[in-house]
Image: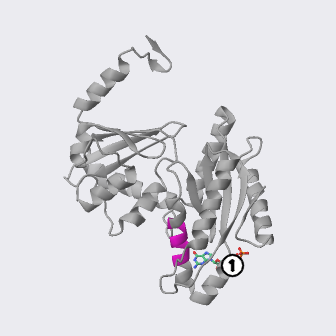
Amino acid sequence: MADSKGIAVSSYFAEDLARLYEQSPLHVVLYDPQDMVRYANPSHCIDFAMARDVPISWSDMMRHSFANKVGAAIQTDDIEAWLISAKARRGKLPFRCFETDLRNGRWMYITETMDEQGWMLSVGFDITALRTNDRSLRQARDGALRAAQVDTLTGVSSRAHVLEQLDLRLNQLRSNQQPCGLVLLDLDYFKKINDTYGHNAGDEVLQRFARLVVSSLGRNDGFGRIGGEEFLLLFPQATPAETEAKVQAILELVRESSPLPEVPRFHHTCSAGLTMLDPALSSIENMRNADRALYAAKGAGRDRLMWA
Ligand SMILES: Nc1nc2c(ncn2[C@@H]2O[C@H](COP(=O)(O)OP(=O)(O)OP(=O)(O)O)[C@@H](O)[C@H]2O)c(=O)[nH]1
């Protein structure tokens, strides 16, 4: 029986699908909302030299791939920086696809489909023999897209990309009542850091700050740089209490960090303005609310969060 949602499932559907995935040359991987691999078929495990019975996160799978020169051909000399930039684009939109090459020279077309709970199905198929003539053109297009979606200095989402995520979360809230915390995060006295230690040191503080925040986030959380030392965070599915706890944890991490190795006694802080997305307001109006709260946090002495 077919309907607008596709062919109706038989009671054997899950079993049949799993059996076929086991035999398929496709790369099939299912990730949970915490980005742990919950299922990976043999074809994927062989190319990534992965044990099937050891739980692994996507990040660790890519670190393993990089360290052992298996699986994805990751072009970088800093895998942690690569992960930050890859995470800026991963799991942010309901669907995306891209081409990538493997260490064994094969080319794969990867599709990622995500539901609102944050489960992600990744299906990759071998396109080594397909349209090789156009490949450099398609790679250039992917590179341009990446450049538009990722902030060059910090590797987190660009302003445009995180605002696109904000619109998506607002639509999800309107259609399915999925709550979402919105946070503006701003480094304190950043001008003084630049003035005291120089602009390069200021850049380093921004980079390390971004890396620290990313380490505390889930895959579906949004994090982008929207201006000089101002960042936007999105916590889909989070309650107000969860949003506040996540931001408190970030403030604590930043407070304890020592981002300039050559000046170990240097510490800094940041302030945050919080609001829960309001479906009756536009993206801009929601941002404005968070901005007012941020302004209040600054006025109240900084190194703290305030609710709109
Ligand atoms: N190093 C570096 N500095 C930047 C960058 N973008 C903006 N800035 C600097 O960030 C500083 C922001 O200063 P202000 O807006 O006065 O804010 P602040 O000093 O952090 O003060 P409060 O926010 O009130 O705590 C300015 O001096 C900008 O020049 C960047 O990419 N790198």
Relative depth, front residue between 97 and 116: 116
Relative to the observer, which residue lies in front, 144 or 213? 213
- Does residue 226 appear anywhere in the picture? no
Q: What element carries label 1?
A: loop
Q: Which residue is pictured at 73% across the width and 71% down the height? A: 302
Q: In which quarter of the image is ligand 1?
A: bottom right
Q: Left or right: 122 with respect to 151?
A: left
Query: Could you tell me residue 120's position as x and y percent?
Result: 44, 39
Image check: 265 left or right of 129?
right
> Toward the viewer: 65 or 125?
65
Instruction: Name the image quarter holding residue 256.
Output: bottom right
- Nearer to me, 74 or 140: 74
Q: Identify the residue position indicated by label 1 in the image.
A: 189
Q: Quadrant where the N terminus lies?
A: top left
Amino acid on which the number 1 mark rests in the picture: Tyr
Q: Where is residue 133 in the image (x, y as percent from the top left)?
A: 25, 50
The boundaries of the magenta stretch are 204-211
Residue drawn at 51 percent across, 81 percent down: 260
Residue 206 among those drawn in magenta: yes
Measured along the vertical axis of the image, is residue 105 above or below residue 195? above
Q: Is mark 1 within 8 Å of ligand 1?
A: yes
Percent across and percent down for residue 10 are 39, 14
Coloring applied to the structure? one colour
Residue depicted at 39% across the width and 14% down the height:
11
